[in-house]
Image (cartoon, helix red, strand yellow):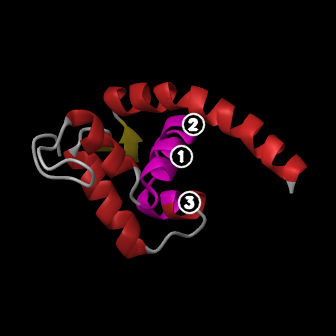
């Protein structure tokens, strides 16, 4: 969380805190699935995330909920408006990564 020590920042600078959260296993994948696929129950989300372990999924959902990026609804879990905004901000990186992957494959 911002203001608390995180990887790369003893003072928990907001940018470093969000990178720390997103760098944890499955954080971006969960946000992606909920932003593009819509709300999902725990089991549906586990299937969408290529059968991530229940322990990891539960931990990440808790962290993402505490960060106000994911919320629990009547339909299961969903991205919050803030979570959807963050996901949209990651889209240019997704597009860049596709170009990068092609370039790296050509060199291999």
Q: Disc 3 vs disc 1: Cβ atoms closer than 8 Å? A: yes
- State the SS at label 3: loop
Residue 73 is at least partly visible in this image: no
**Side of 23 relative to 104 (left or right):** left
**Side of 19 relative to 108 (left or right):** left
- State the SS at label 2: helix
Q: Disc 1 vs disc 2: Cβ atoms closer than 8 Å? A: yes
- Callout 2 crowding tier (Cα within 10 Å): few <14, some 14–19, many ≥20: few
**Side of 51 relative to 98 (left or right):** left
Gap in angstroms between the C-alphas marked 1 and 2:
5 Å
Q: Is residue 83 placed above or below 59 in the rendered structure?
A: above
Residue 72 within the magenta-colored segment of the rendering: no
Name the residue located 36 percent from the left edge and 74 percent from the top edge.
55
Q: Position of residue 36 (x, y in %)?
A: 57, 36
Question: Residue furthest toward the front?
Answer: 107
Choose the circle earlier in sequence order: 3 or 2.
2
Q: Which residues are magenta?
A: 25-45
Name the residue located 41 percent from the left edge and 73 percent from the top edge.
54
Q: Which residue is mark 2?
A: 36
Choose the circle earlier in sequence order: 3 or 1.
1
Residue 39 within the magenta-colored segment of the rendering: yes
Q: Which residue is mark 3?
A: 49
């Amino acid at each position: 969380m911002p203001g608390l020590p995180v990887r790369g920042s003893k003072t928990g600078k907001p940018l470093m805190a969000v990178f720390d959260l997103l760098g944890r296993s499955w954080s971006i994948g969960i946000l992606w699935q909920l932003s593009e696929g819509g709300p999902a129950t725990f089991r549906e989300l586990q299937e969408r995330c290529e059968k991530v372990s229940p322990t990891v999924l539960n931990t990440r959902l808790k962290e993402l909920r505490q960060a106000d990026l994911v919320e629990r609804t009547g339909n299961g879990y969903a991205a919050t408006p803030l979570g959807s905004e963050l996901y949209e901000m990651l889209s240019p990186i997704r597009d860049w990564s596709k170009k990068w992957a092609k370039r790296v494959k050509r060199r291999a």
